[in-house]
């Protein structure tokens, strides 16, 4: 499964986060090992993440991931990395708020 297919399979995850009143403002997929598309880090950023503990954030995100994706999809996500507000990854564009996922360079972007 390549990055584009994985991003499409993560769309229900992003939509469910928003439905549960914890939308992800930005998210991107980065290869765990550069050039090896077998495992990805899902980087997420949102204001609500800064308002709760790291463990609470991860518990919510992994619960939603399990509720909305198949085993094959989850196997591709090595971990979820929480990006605190004010932080950014200059080399990776992030998705815009309240839109559907598309692929642009290395990121999950919203069309």
Image (tube, rainbow, N blue to C red):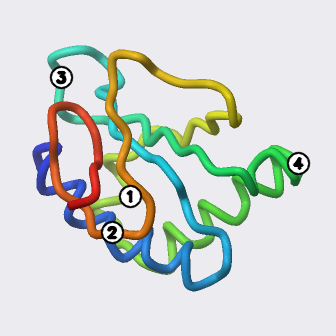
Q: Nearer the viewer, mark 3 or mark 2?
A: 2
Distance CA(mark 4)–CA(mark 3): 32 Å
Along the polypeptide, which appears first: circle 1 or circle 4? 4
Distance CA(mark 3)–CA(mark 1): 17 Å
Q: Nearer the viewer, mark 1 or mark 4?
A: 4
Question: For the C terminus, which image quadrant?
Answer: bottom left
Is residue 100 found left or right of 16 in the rendered image?
A: left
- In this view, the residue in front, 96 or 92, is 96
- The residue indicated by pointer 3 is 36
- The residue indicated by pointer 1 is 74
Residue at the location (35% across, 49% down)? 95
Numbered disc 4: secondary structure: loop
Distance CA(mark 2)–CA(mark 1): 22 Å
Q: Quadrant of residue 94?
A: top left
Is residue 41 positioned above or below 109 on the image? above
Residue 7: give x, y in percent of width and height: 24, 55
Distance CA(mark 4)–CA(mark 2): 27 Å
Residue at the location (43% across, 77% down)? 15
Along the polypeptide, which appears first: circle 4 or circle 2? 4
Contact? badges 4 and 3 (CB < 8 Å): no
Q: Nearer the viewer, mark 4 or mark 3?
A: 4
Is residue 23 found left or right of 47 in the rendered image?
A: left
Along the polypeptide, which appears first: circle 3 or circle 1? 3
- The residue indicated by pointer 4 is 53
Q: Quadrant of residue 34?
A: top left
Say few, some or many: other residues with alpha carbon within 10 Å of mark 2 (under 14 / 14 to 19 / 20 or more): some
Along the polypeptide, which appears first: circle 3 or circle 2? 3
Along the polypeptide, which appears first: circle 2 or circle 1? 1
């Amino acid at each position: 499964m390549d990055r584009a297919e994985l991003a499409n399979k993560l769309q229900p995850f992003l939509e469910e986060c928003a439905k549960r009143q914890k939308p992800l403002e930005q998210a991107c997929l980065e290869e765990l090992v550069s050039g090896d598309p077998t495992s990805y880090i899902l980087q997420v950023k949102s204001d609500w993440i800064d308002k709760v503990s790291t463990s609470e954030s991860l518990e919510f995100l992994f619960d939603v991931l399990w509720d909305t994706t198949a085993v094959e999809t989850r196997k591709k996500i090595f971990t979820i990395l929480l990006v605190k507000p004010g932080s950014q990854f200059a080399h990776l564009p992030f998705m815009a708020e309240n839109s559907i996922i598309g692929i642009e360079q290395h990121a999950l972007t919203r069309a």
